[in-house]
């Protein structure tokens, strides 16, 4: 992802990205049933670093496992590269947390671009108050050890029904999180820039009383008016 692509995606909605991916035949890149803790804040954009959980087995997940410096959850927090988004596969099971405020705070300090899980997050109020964008299925107090065993780092995973590969680009806003395949990021960003401009113009037209018929999508007459407006802006 180039700096220009990142700058554009930071201004592009997940809704616009979903439409652009759909035009390319990709229908299932939106992570389902995940929302942001807290409101407002900056849009999340960054390459993906993954953590995969499997169902916990009681004899392998006593509380003492966290003393192991090679525990995959702890390694994920300490090894994720700066400006990346940690995406966790919890099998859409939010009956236990996949992380809490201490680990998410550490991710923020390390320069992580965001946190996404289709499981739960504990200490939700504290996480919501942090600057780092954090998305989960819902707040959940039980420790991850009760339901989840951290296993693999930076491998392909499923999160909220979406296929997620390392170094794909995660974008998150008030609607949720969408995953852009890495090889499409620059292409999507280039088209998104003009799409966002067009849709902002359409919203202004609708507010002024213009019918959506022939406006969205636009017919030839509307296209001529829009192109004339663009020329004036330039």
Image (cartoon, rainbow, N blue to C red):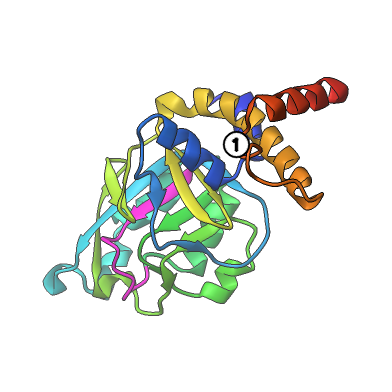
Extreme right residue here?
Answer: 232
Numbered disc total: 1
Q: What element carries label 1?
A: helix
In the image, 17 versus 144, the foreground residue is 17
| Residue 27 percent location from the top left of the image | 35, 42
Q: Quadrant of the C terminus?
A: top right
Asked where in the image residue 222 lies, by quadrant, the reply is: top right
| Residue 64 percent location from the top left of the image | 27, 71
Kindly tell me whether residue 136 is visible in this rendering: yes
| Residue 139 percent location from the top left of the image | 45, 74
Q: Is residue 49 left or right of residue 107?
A: left
| Residue 101 percent location from the top left of the image | 51, 68
Extreme bottom residue here?
Answer: 141
Crowding at dot 1, Cα within 10 Å, few <14 / some 14-19 / many 20+, comes out as many
Name the residue located 38 percent from the left edge and 44 percent from the top edge.
Answer: 29
Name the residue located 71 percent from the left edge and 41 percent from the top edge.
Answer: 202
Kindly tell me whether residue 168 is visible in this rendering: no
The majority secondary structure of the magenta stretch comes to loop
Q: In this view, does 96 lie above or below 10?
A: below
Q: In this view, does 42 lie to the left or right of 154?
A: right
- What segment carries the magenta color? 85-97
In the image, 33 versus 130, the foreground residue is 33
In the image, 109 versus 24, the foreground residue is 24
Name the residue located 27 percent from the left edge and 41 percent from the top edge.
Answer: 156
As for residue 90 lying within the magenta part, the answer is yes
Q: In this view, does 167 lie above or below 176?
A: above
Reading the image, the residue beneath label 1 is 9
Name the residue located 51 percent from the left edge and 39 percent from the top edge.
Answer: 17
């Amino acid at each position: 992802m180039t700096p220009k692509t990142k700058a554009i995606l930071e201004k592009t909605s997940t809704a616009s990205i979903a439409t652009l991916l759909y035009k390319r035949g990709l229908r299932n890149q939106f992570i389902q049933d995940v929302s942001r803790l807290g409101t407002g804040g900056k849009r999340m954009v960054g390459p993906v670093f993954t953590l995969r959980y499997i169902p916990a087995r009681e004899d392998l997940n006593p509380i003492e496992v966290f003393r192991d410096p090679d525990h995959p959850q702890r390694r994920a927090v300490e090894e994720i590269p700066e400006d990346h988004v940690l995406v966790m596969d919890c099998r859409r099971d939010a009956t236990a947390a996949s992380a809490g405020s201490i680990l998410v705070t550490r991710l923020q300090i390390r320069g992580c671009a965001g946190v996404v899980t289709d499981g739960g997050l504990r200490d939700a109020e504290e996480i919501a108050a942090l600057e780092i964008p954090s998305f989960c299925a819902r707040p959940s107090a039980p420790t991850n050890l009760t339901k989840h065993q951290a296993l693999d780092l930076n491998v392909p995973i499923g999160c909220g029904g979406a296929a997620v590969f390392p170094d794909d680009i995660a974008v998150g806003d008030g609607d949720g999180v969408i995953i852009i395949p890495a090889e499409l990021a620059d292409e999507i960003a280039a088209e998104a820039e003009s799409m966002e401009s067009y849709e902002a113009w359409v919203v202004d037209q609708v507010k002024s009383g213009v019918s959506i018929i022939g406006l969205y999508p636009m017919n030839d007459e509307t296209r001529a008016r829009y192109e004339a407006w663009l020329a004036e802006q330039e």
